[in-house]
Amino acid sequence: MSACRALRASKALVRYSAARLTRPVAVPLEARRRFAVSAPTMSSFYPDWEPDGPTVKTEIPGPQAKAAIVELNEVFDTRSLNMLTDYSKSTGNYIADPDGNVLLDVYAQIASIPLGYNNPVLRKAARTDAMINGLINRPALGNFPPAEWAEILRTGILKVAPSGLNQVFTAMAGSDANETAYKAAFMYRRQRDRGGPNVEFTEEEMNSAMVNQSPGASNQLSILSFKTAFHGRLFGSLSTTRSKPIHKLDIPAFDWPQATFPQLKYPLDAHAAENAEIERTALDEVERLITTYHLPPCAVVVEPIQSEGGDNHATPAFFRGLREVTRKHGVLLIVDEVQTGVGATGRFWAHEHWDLHDPPDMVTFSKKAQTAGYYFGNPELRPNKPYRQFNTWMGDPARALLFRAIIDEVERLDLVRHTARVGEYLYEKLERLADKYPGEFRNLRGKGMGTFIAFDNPRRDEFLAKAKTFGVNIGGSGQSAVRLRPMLIFEEKHADILIDVLERIVTSW
Ligand SMILES: Cc1ncc(COP(=O)(O)O)c(C=O)c1O
């Protein structure tokens, strides 16, 4: 370690130790020693960028944040506020607040930051003429795409297109990506039933569309989703979201079918036969709904790992079965990679873990991509006429440029493989914690899935609140899951800090 690095590391330790002295919770000596042993060094990816560790100076929110929240609350609903943030002071894996607290962030803006706060390479990309042009001359993409749009797509979004899918419809956010994919599925199916793209709509069809009716109830179609799924909160996507009532209350919804997502038993190795049976039953239910539901599904939408619903996993065999059953009945398979995509599972797309020979029909993306949309391969998924799938912006070239810069950096630093490796390291350490404190780290899941790891804790909300006091920002999902969603630049040394804090939380009750 250089003298300069050593000085910075020791300063960080002092800062961290001092902060701990001000904490109201008791810190076991053993844990403190372990933290000192695994004291982090600087970022391995970018020099002089990250702090060496968390700093907790005040309670969170501290006095500055509290005052700012009161002011904000006068004009903006703050009831869902997690942490008032100072983005100018947040760097790498560390999120800062106005009181000078700096936390290791393994929640990362709900899994949407790929390369760390204030990433130097992205800051450089943001200063280019191309980016400025995209930002201040925002095009109505369907009507006036920039001359270089094909090149931006080919060298960015499409460069990482899932195997078998070579086209994209760009969108604004995850819910929007799913809704436009659903629309494409409905139009595709009706076009097929009608006899192809050149068959004109009937007068009756056009008239009934204008009064929100299909000509005959038998023509109504649906999208099948799974119980505890999350696909967004806009009107259409919300009908496929089944994670929590609070998301859905009072909002008119479509009468669409839901199938049971396999509820696997952990550890997976110990329950292989039982889990295989659970998955077979779930697939049978999907097939039954496809063939008997009163509004026939034209598509099935599924997350590779149900994320907001509590990090529910299924095996590759289940997803291969889902592909088979949808193909058998001419139903499209939409894989929602909004949360799982862009590297966090140790593959660029989580569905690469399934070894499909027959790709999904559409893959939706957003979050870490910073832009959004759906990939597809079959040209018939383009509606037969222009303006059937259209909005003013239909995406955003500035965000597409940002995704291109992210992709280049992910490749340059080999971050997908890096995440797979760090995930293994982290999982192994969590397994040891789970052995030691089985009641606190229940149903550990995500083995072999990069850093996309979760466990259940009986006092989950308290657990998350306590994590902040020890210098780590963690998210929850579902009823009791603590979900880890670090960025792709999360390293072994960050894992050591995290593990240390997790142990300190459960020994501090
Ligand atoms: C799997 C999945 N799909 C869709 C969405 C909705 O994305 P957005 O909040 O960007 O609309 C989310 C958001 O958490 C998600 O996790």
Image (tube, grey):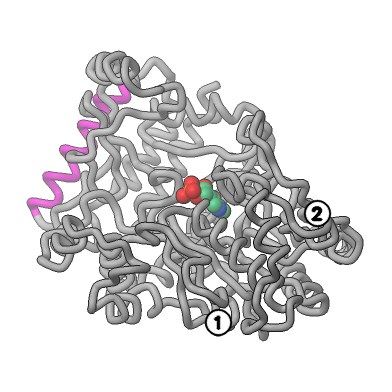
Amino acid at circle 1: Gly
- Mark 2 is surrounded, within 10 Å at the Cα level, by few (under 14), some (14 to 19) or many (20 or more) other residues, namely many
Q: Residue at x 34, y 45 (%)?
A: 37
Q: In which quarter of the image is the N terminus?
A: bottom left
User: Is 266 rendered above or below residue 334?
Assistant: above
Say if the magenta span includes residue 13: yes
Q: On the rendered structure, is 489 left or right of 259?
A: left
In the rendered structure, find residue 259 and report the number of the disc placed on it: 2
- Mark 1 residue CB less than 8 A from any atom of ligand 1: no
Q: In terms of sequence position, does the residue under pointer 1 or pointer 2 come before the other?
A: 2
Q: In which quarter of the image is residue 189?
A: bottom right
User: Is 189 rendered above or below residue 45?
Assistant: below
Say if the magenta span includes residue 280: no
Q: In which quarter of the image is the C terminus?
A: top right
Q: Is residue 429 visible?
A: yes
Q: Give 107 or 326, whichever is nearer the viewer.
A: 326
Q: Residue at x 41, y 27 (%)?
A: 81
User: Of discs 1 and 2, which sits in the foreground?
Assistant: 1
Give the magenta part as a residue range.
3-21
Q: Dot 1: what SS?
A: loop
Q: Name the residue under label 1.
A: 377
Q: Give 456 or 88, whichever is nearer the viewer.
A: 88
Magenta segment main secondary structure: helix
Amino acid at circle 2: Ala
User: Is 302 rendered above or below residue 18?
Assistant: below
Residue 389 x/y as whole percent: 50, 65
Mark 1 and mark 2: Cα distance apart in space: 26 Å
